[in-house]
Amino acid sequence: MRKVGSSGGVAGRPAAHGKDMARVTSKLQVTIPKALAERYGIAPGQEIEWLPAGEAIRVVPQASLQRTPDRARRVELFDRATARQLERQAGKTPVVGAEREWRREDVYGRDGAR
């Protein structure tokens, strides 16, 4: 169970405003806010999938699960991931084998077994 702060939001996060909130009915039905439905292309009658994501629930429109990104989109995603990795590695110096305190042979032994 999540702890709710005095402002109404989940602890550590600001409280959401009316446009961002949805209420669960007695039949456990949820209305998707119009702004989110329009942003993600969710239409009446369309199926959505509810996926557990740790202490949250991820709502995924069925169409986005079936759609395979085209080549340009895949290249864009790859380039963005590469840029993030380069940012993480910026300023770090790679460790060269001679600078390590161990040798491959010490770890794996002569026959390659641990």
Image (tube, helix red, strand yellow):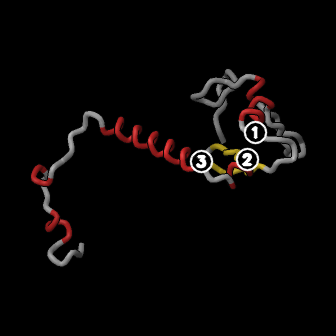
Instruction: Identify the residue at image location x=83%, y=37%.
Output: 31
- Packing grade of label 3 (10 A; few <14, some 14-19, many >=20) is few
Q: Residues within 10 Å of mark 1 (few under 14, many from 20)?
A: few
- Estimate the spatial distance between the alpha carbons at disc 3 and disc 1, rounded to whole Å: 25 Å
Q: Return the residue nearer the eye: 89 or 71.
A: 71
Please indicate whether residue 24 sits to the left or right of residue 107 in the image.
right
- Label 1 is placed on what type of residue? Gly
Q: Are marks 1 and 2 in contact (CB under 8 Å)?
A: yes
Q: Name the residue: 21% across, 44% down.
A: 94
For marks 1 and 2, the one nearer the N-term is 1
Badge 2 is on which residue? Answer: 61
Extreme residue toward the right, this view:
27
| Disc marking residue 54 | 3
Q: First in sequence: mark 2 or mark 3?
A: 3
* Residue 20 found in image quarter: top right
Residue in view at x 66 percent, y 42 percent: 1
Q: Position of residue 2 (x, y in %)?
A: 64, 38
Q: Work out which residue is located at the far left of the displayed protein and give it.
A: 98
Separation of disc 2 and disc 3 at Cα? 19 Å
Instruction: Find out whether the residues at labels 3 and 1 contact each other: C-beta distance under 8 Å.
Output: no
The local crowd at label 2, few if under 14, some if 14 to 19, many if 20 or more residues have their Cα within 10 Å, is some
Question: Which of pointers 3 and 1 indicates the residue nearer the eye?
Answer: 1
Q: Is residue 10 above or below residue 53?
A: above
Marks 1, 2: nearer the viewer: 1
Give the residue type that dot 2 points to.
Pro
The amino acid type, in three-letter code, at marker 3 is Gly
Task: Name the quadrant containing residue 4.
Answer: top right
On residue 41, which mark appears?
1
**Label 3: element kind:** loop
Give the percent coordinates (x, y) of residue 112.
21, 75
Q: Quadrant of the C terminus?
A: bottom left
